Amino acid sequence: MTPVPPAQRLGHTIHRLGAIASTQAEAARLASAGVPEGVVVTATHQTQGRGRRGRGWLDCPGQNLLMSVVLHPRITPGAAPRLSLVAAVAVVDALREVAAVPAAIRWPNDVLVDGRKVAGILPEASTDSAGALLRVILGIGINVNETAFPDEVRETATSLRLASGAAFEVEAVLDSVLAALDLRYGQFLAGGLEAIREAWLARTWTIGRRARGAGGVEGVAIDLAPDGALVLRTDAGETVRVLAGEVTTEADHAPAH
């Protein structure tokens, strides 16, 4: 367990672990035990890593950044998914700074480089018996130095090393992500999603591409709504919102990693 300067909201305490089942599960255990907001769990390898919608997250031991952050935002449970958008902006900022790669956001919570997935984000909310939000465990996985991927994601995944041709210290990537997330999360707490919406739009890969949402609704992605929904314009000229569920886009690399 490593302390960092207390002025930082997130990452003041970091639990650096070896091979564990899941950083999400360990962070949730610590949160249930009463640790404060901003505690971070990292691991060199996960045996039961999770992506969106129950998919597995595959990693090569020691090559990637696997982290989960305990958050206690004073928001409604319905607003918790917006933390994916906040974290995506922070991850793009961090990767552009630390690795100088053209990272971009695929709605709602993937980060791509050259159209391939380099990072994924998973916010998991817990509520009390009255339905109030207790906490959010924000998981972030970034492919840092991995160069060989399993068959199911070989054509759709990349890493900072593959994208840049250089190897990176995982700790340096962690430091950059925490600094960027600390800033963007603070902006979100102060001003809601609107405080980072323009930054999200400036970093998106999705806007301007054809997308298909749950139920078969399809159109060109044209905007991010104030509540985080993806706004599509159909071929009939109608404007529709996609708030949750699976979304596929043209030239999409949909399989989770």
Image (cartoon, rainbow, N blue to C red):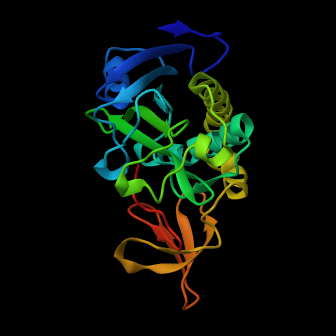
Residue 122 image point, x, y percent:
43, 42
Residue at (50, 67) in percent of width and height: 252
Asked if 120 appears above or below 31 in the picture, the reply is below
Residue 64 image point, x, y percent:
49, 33
| 123 or 162: nearer the viewer | 162
Residue at (51, 55) in percent of width and height: 108
Asked whether the viewer can see residue 227, the reply is: no
Asked if 16 appears above or below 221 in the picture, the reply is above
| 189 or 123: nearer the viewer | 123
Where is residue 126, by image quadrant? top left
Left or right of 253 in this view: 111: right
| 123 or 150: nearer the viewer | 150
| Number of numbered labels in the structure image | 0
Where is residue 30, by image quadrant? top left
Residue at (40, 17) in percent of width and height: 17
| 149 or 34: nearer the viewer | 149
List the single residue furthest toward the bottom. 236
Left or right of 91 in this view: 100: right
Where is residue 95, by image quadrant? top right
